[in-house]
Image: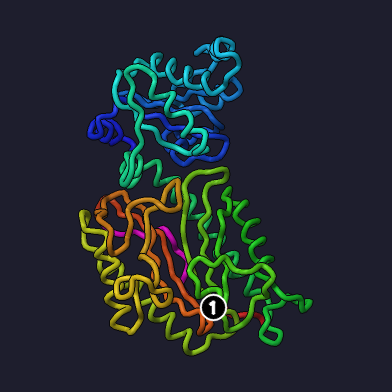
């Protein structure tokens, strides 16, 4: 949790961390700045003190709304430095880093750099930052400080995540009802005028509905038939929905403008369900229950849930990444992942993961089966959290039925 940051910094011998961000959304900056809607600037946290936002004059009021201390670039002498360095903005930026660290009385030593920025600019900037006397700027691989802090969520974060979940669940219900309001015309899903419902039109419906809940699409999957047999196929907008074909609907929206995510997948068959697809769906549904049954208590290795699901699929005759590491059919991915301000966070639920499941985790459970040459793929996914009692609690409340009945 965020309250662990000082302890995690001490373990890494970091005097401070600096989170960078360009004009694009940065999950790390959002996390450390209480969701401040700023572009550019820095967030600096000295060990033992609250984060401080360093922003330009146009954004100082927005920065202060975060409830955190904020410093205006002008307070650090941006204009004077720019003149001193002959208009060289990169050199001025280095000078601003130095002044900001001094202003915040950051002791000399190791400074961790995190966040999202144009890699080419930061790479060029780093040698000049290393020339600042007394400071050693460093990055981090593997389980980073922010990864470790964000693996568990506090009450405020969970409240926001539950709000995203409620809007996502409502969008699922609206989408089911929207499709169900159509009819089958020669096995094509059509409206009352006989016009085919395309995946593109359905995608636009989902996006509009999400906006009603202050959520935004971040690349939903709507893939049917053979396309559904490829786990990350986004689907083709020009295709009409067809009866009897699996439609994998993977929806992972976030708070509008950036923030917390929810992640859910349902597989639907409009009109009717082929026997082979019904059998596969029953298998995936049982695999989902196997994953939940494999949960025991906080501190459990995350890989044990994946291994239980792999045992189940392999016993049923389906290949997995454990039985065949290069497999592209059958169960060809991990069981799930953590999520928060990024859609893929720790813990990892792969069979090679070293992560331990903890109270406060928010993660996905998403078994699936994929056979593109047999014309189908299926996945079922809920977002769950581990509550204070150690129980797995679903944040997704929409049903998992396969057959989506049409009118007429």
Residue in the picture at 58% in, 54% down: 217
Look at the picture and state if 370 lies above or below 393: below
Relative to the observer, which residue lies in front, 208 or 369?
A: 369
Give the labeled residue for mark 1.
246
Look at the image and give the residue range highlighted in magenta.
Answer: 391-403
Residue in the picture at 29% in, 78% down: 312
Q: Horizontal and vertical percent for residue 278?
A: 46, 85
Q: How is the image coloured?
A: rainbow
Look at the picture and state if 227 lies above or below 340: below
Residue in the picture at 30% in, 79% down: 314
In the picture, residue 113 is in which quadrant? Answer: top left
Residue 228 seen from this side: yes
In the picture, residue 272 is in which quadrant? Answer: bottom right
* Magenta-colored stretch includes residue 335: no
Q: How many badges with numbers are in the image?
A: 1
Q: Is residue 346 left or right of residue 22?
A: left
Q: Dividing the image into 4 quarters, which one contains the C terminus?
A: bottom right
Residue 152 seen from this side: no
Q: Main secondary structure of the magenta part?
A: loop
* Magenta-colored stretch includes residue 396: yes
Look at the picture and state if 74 lies above or below 208: above
SS type, badge 1: loop
Residue sitting at the far bottom = 275
Residue in the picture at 34% in, 44% down: 147
Q: Horizontal and vertical percent for residue 143?
A: 31, 46
Q: Horizontal and vertical percent for residue 26?
A: 49, 39
């Amino acid at each position: 949790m965020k309250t662990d940051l000082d302890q995690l910094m001490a373990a890494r011998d970091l005097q401070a961390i600096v989170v960078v961000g360009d004009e694009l959304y940065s999950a790390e900056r959002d996390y450390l700045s209480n969701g401040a809607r700023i572009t550019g600037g820095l967030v600096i946290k000295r060990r033992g003190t609250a984060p401080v936002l360093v922003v330009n004059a146009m954004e100082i009021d927005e920065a202060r709304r975060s409830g955190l201390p904020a410093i205006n670039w002008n307070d650090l002498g941006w204009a004077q430095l720019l003149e001193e360095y002959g208009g060289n903005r990169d050199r001025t930026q280095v000078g601003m880093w130095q002044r900001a660290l001094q202003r915040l009385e950051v002791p000399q030593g190791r400074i961790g750099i995190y966040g999202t920025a144009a890699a080419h600019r930061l790479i060029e900037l780093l040698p000049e930052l290393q020339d600042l006397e007394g400071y050693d700027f460093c990055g981090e691989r593997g389980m980073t400080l922010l990864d470790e802090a964000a693996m568990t969520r506090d009450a405020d974060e969970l409240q926001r995540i539950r709000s995203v979940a409620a809007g996502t669940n409502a969008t699922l219900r609206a989408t089911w009802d929207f499709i169900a309001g159509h009819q089958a015309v020669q096995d094509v899903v059509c409206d009352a005028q006989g016009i085919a419902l395309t995946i593109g039109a359905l995608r636009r419906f989902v996006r509009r509905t999400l906006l009603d809940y202050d959520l935004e699409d971040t690349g939903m999957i709507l893939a049917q038939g053979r396309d559904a047999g490829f786990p990350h196929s986004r689907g083709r907008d020009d295709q009409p929905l067809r009866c009897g074909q699996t439609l994998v609907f993977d929806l992972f929206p976030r708070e509008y403008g950036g923030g917390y995510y929810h992640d859910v997948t349902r597989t639907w068959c409009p009109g009717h369900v082929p026997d082979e697809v019904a059998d596969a769906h029953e298998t995936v549904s049982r695999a989902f229950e196997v994953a939940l049954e494999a949960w025991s208590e906080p501190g459990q290795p995350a890989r044990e849930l994946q291994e239980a699901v792999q045992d189940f699929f392999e016993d049923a005759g389906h290949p997995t990444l454990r039985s065949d590491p290069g497999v592209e059919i059958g169960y060809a991915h991990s069981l799930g992942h953590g999520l928060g301000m990024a859609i893929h966070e720790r813990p990892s639920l792969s069979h090679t993961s070293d992560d331990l499941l903890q109270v406060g985790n928010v993660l996905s459970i998403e078994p699936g089966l994929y056979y593109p040459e047999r014309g189908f793929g299926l996945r079922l996914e809920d977002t769950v959290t581990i509550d204070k009692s150690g129980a797995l609690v679903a944040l997704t409340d929409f049903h998992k039925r396969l057959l989506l009945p049409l009118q007429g």
